[in-house]
Image (spheres, rainbow, N blue to C red):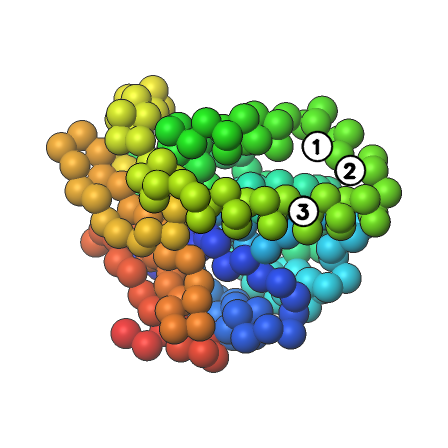
Amino acid sequence: MAATHVIADLHLIDDCEPAARRLAGYLAGPARDAAALYVLGDLFEVWIGDDGSIREHAATLDALRELVLSGVPAYFMRGNRDFAVGQAFETFSGLTLIDDPSRVILYGVPTLLAHGDIFCSDDTAHQAFRAKYTDPAWRHKRLALPLWVRRAVARRARRRSSKRKAGLPSSIMDVNTATVARMAAEYDVARIIHGHTHRPADHPGTDVDRYVLADWRPERAEVLCIDDAGVRRRQLNAAGEFVD
């Protein structure tokens, strides 16, 4: 049986960078054998809106659409970096937008998929931002701003975010285990898969198993593969091919 693939946190800047070329190779290669592909947010470093970001990621969107046209269903969950993706993104990429979090059944296992920042409840400043960017009315108001304003706001937000992170204890930006347990019970799941924290690891538990997706870096790119046998991390080379 084909495996379901899950990725997140590629933080693509444009179509010319090595990460985008690696993704294109993966989408034209290993992803074609997947039962489905889930992209759990922060595919892009910043998305200022469909009207301002589609052009610089046109080749990536084409590669995603080709995957869907080949018969592989693919889904996208907004992250804190690309919360502004909209209907045009959905049309150009062929991906289906899903809620954060989303409960799915993967090979008989109730599973909660999330971008991941929802679990970082100790980071109160980010939670305040999350409450805004997940609000459709707030997104609509933000997207009504001129493109030059949105670009300026995005640049300032990235600078402020980097500065803030440098001064915070790393534990604050990680998940709160009590929040994870509460949401696992609320959604009645035995497995949680998420990204956002850039701390890839498997966390087996008594009540719920948690898998943190890897962010893609020049030295590491990873796909989480789920099938009847369980969960496996598979590495990609620079061309987007599985190496294990």
Q: Which of these two is toward me, 171 or 14?
A: 171
Q: Tell me where residue 182 appears, x and y as whole percent.
A: 30, 22
Label disc, if present, on residue 143 of the rendered structure: 2
- Residue 124 vs residue 179: left or right? right
Q: Amino acid at mark 3?
A: Arg
The mark nearer the N terminus, 1 or 3, is: 1
Determine crowd level at label 2: few under 14, some 14-19, many 20+ residues with C-alpha closer than 10 A: some
Q: Amino acid at mark 2?
A: Leu
Q: Are marks 1 and 2 in contact (CB under 8 Å)?
A: yes
Question: Can you identify the residue that label 1 sits on?
Answer: 139
Q: Tell me where residue 114 appears, x and y as whole percent.
A: 43, 38
For the view shown, which residue lies furthest in the left direction? 206
At mark 1, the secondary structure is helix
Count of numbered marks: 3
Q: Amino acid at mark 1?
A: Arg
Q: Are marks 2 and 3 in contact (CB under 8 Å)?
A: no
At mark 3, the secondary structure is helix
Q: Tell me where residue 210 appears, x and y as whole percent.
A: 27, 41
Q: Nearer the viewer, mark 1 or mark 3?
A: 3
Report the residue at 35% width, 41% height from top.
169
Label disc, if present, on residue 156 of the rendered structure: 3
Report the residue at 34% width, 69% height from top.
235
Report the residue at 26% width, 58% height from top.
232
Q: Tell me where residue 183 appears, x and y as whole percent.
A: 34, 25
